[in-house]
């Protein structure tokens, strides 16, 4: 446990030293851009976490049992006259009756 703390402190010190070395060579505009990026990340991270938690809570399944589906209702319209057991046969008018038809096949060559 103690070795882990010592290693963590050494890594933090090395990171700070590297950051100071790089920052000494950067221009003022580059440092301002890096500071803006750091502030943006610092602001966006908590908001993103809060949004994720909120969405996660709203999508979590509820602990109440699901409601039973409503009963099925079948509506049968009232009939004014009784329905016959068989379908009555209505003869087809002569104009609609099928007559023998002849077909001509086109697009084929004659066989000799």
Image: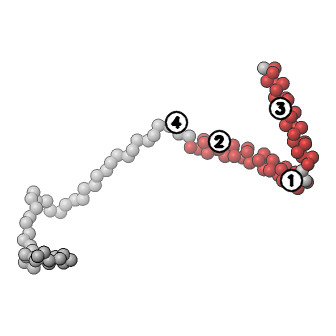
**Mark 3 Cα within 10 Å, few/some/many (few <14, many 20+)?**
few
In the displayed structure, 70 sits above or below 5; it is below
Label drawn at residue 30: 1
Q: Nearer the viewer, residue 4 or 93?
A: 4
> Is residue 73 left or right of 46 when viewed as pictured?
left
Residue identifier under label 2: 53
> Which residue is at 73% across, 44% downward?
46
Label drawn at residue 11: 3
**Mark 2 Cα within 10 Å, few/some/many (few <14, many 20+)?**
few
Q: Position of residue 104 (x, y in %)?
A: 14, 78
**Mark 3 secondary-structure assignment:** helix
Q: Nearer the viewer, residue 86 or 50?
A: 50
C-alpha distance separating marks 4 and 3: 47 Å
Of marks 4 and 3, which one's residue comes earlier in the chain? Answer: 3
Of marks 2 and 3, which one's residue comes earlier in the chain? Answer: 3
Of marks 2 and 4, which one's residue comes earlier in the chain? Answer: 2
Coloring scheme used: secondary structure
């Amino acid at each position: 446990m103690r070795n882990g703390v010592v290693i963590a402190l050494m890594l933090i010190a090395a990171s700070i030293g590297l950051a100071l070395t790089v920052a000494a060579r950067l221009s003022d505009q580059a440092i301002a851009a890096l500071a803006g990026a750091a502030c943006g990340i610092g602001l966006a991270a908590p908001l993103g976490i809060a949004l994720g938690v909120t969405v996660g809570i709203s999508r979590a399944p509820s602990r109440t049992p699901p409601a039973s589906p409503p009963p099925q209702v079948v509506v049968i319209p009232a009939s004014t006259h009784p329905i016959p057991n068989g379908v009555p046969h209505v003869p087809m008018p002569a104009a609609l009756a099928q007559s023998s038809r002849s077909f001509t096949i086109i697009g084929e060559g004659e066989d000799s």
